[in-house]
Amino acid sequence: MAILPRHNPTFRPLHHARLSHHNSLPARIYCSTTTTPAKPSRDQIIKRPTIVPAALVQTAATVSTRPVLNDPSLQSTWSHRVWVASGCTTVLISLSKSLTTAVDSHIWIEPILAGFIGYVLADLGSGIYHWGIDNYGDSETPFFGKQIEAFQGHHKWPWTITRRQFANNLHALARAVTFTVLPLDLICNDNAVLHGFVGVCSGCIMFSQQFHAWAHCTKSKLPAAVVALQDAGILVSRSQHAAHHRSPYNNNYCIVSGVWNEILDNSKFFEAMEMILFFKLGVRPRSWTEPNSDWTEETESASLISEL
């Protein structure tokens, strides 16, 4: 390595020497060799959140506000109730068509099997959707902004879902079910298998938020039938969903039965999807950030005390 000084202090004029006492300049060093930084590994890419532009990191702090006691946003409105009623009606129409067609045609196994497949796929769909809105977007995202805000804030205040009234909790999914299932009810009349699948799948998706709320309730506050269904694995259990609210906050996304949680987590399905989106679009999921106050659960008692 060759080091070349910019100035030679031995041959300086007198007037220059006097000025340098007040305005000394640091010597600039030139090196004949350069170093090339090592290419970061895949693990380093994932584990260095501090170098990521703020615009690419989704945080709940910008989209969620502290809930208050008797918050009007947790109460049902008449429009919520209308949407839930319309969603339930479309699901019941689909199930009744499946039943009457099965009776007339004496076909039972196929509609029952189709309904079971719908139940299993509803759990898978709930997990993928839950993963998406937990990790990407914010309150300004078109169409999904309000649900993203609610789900991302849910990690900070998970107990609020138990305070939401029934129609308030289900109306968004009920509206989506209405627009999706109603055309099928009007077009398809004599297909027991199709209606068996659609009726069960859409019903489980619409009520998944209620199953989710039950997973946050204490056992003593739940009906005995709900506890029995949770213990049997038919509905997502309280212990299984509790793991979703513990670090590293990137597992157990499914909220219907939870049957897919172990499969998706062990296969690293969501991690693979996150890597694909990161390398294709440059967007990091929210779960890659180090756990901070936005992820840390604030208990109901702490929130109430802070209001005093």
Image (cartoon, rainbow, N blue to C red):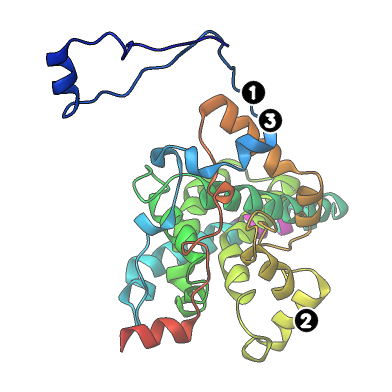
Residue at figure coordinates x 34%, y 79% from the top left: 68
Q: Is residue 167 magenta?
A: no
Q: Which residue is mark 1?
A: 39
Along the horizontal axis of the image, is 10 left or right of 207? Answer: left
Q: Is residue 95 magenta?
A: yes
C-alpha separation, residue under disc 3 versus residue under disc 1: 6 Å
Query: Residue under circle 3?
Result: 41
Q: Please tell me whether the stretch drawn in magenta is mainly helix, strand or loop.
A: helix
Of the numbered discs 3 and 2, the one sitting upstream in the chain is 3
The mark that comes first in sequence, 1 or 2, is 1
Of helix, strand and loop, which one carries label 2?
helix
**Residue 42 spot, x, y in % from top left:** 68, 32
Left or right: where 213 falls relative to 77: right
Residue identified by numbered label 2: 228
Q: Are marks 3 and 1 in contact (CB under 8 Å)?
A: yes
The residue nearer to you, when weighing 227 against 189, is 227
Q: CA distance from mark 3 to mark 2?
A: 47 Å
- Residue 8 position, x and y percent, is 33, 10
Check disc 1: other Cα within 10 Å, few if <14, some if 14-19, many if 20+: few
From which residue to which does the magenta span run?
Answer: 94-99
- Determine the image quadrant of residue 30: top left
- Residue type highlighted by circle 2: Ala
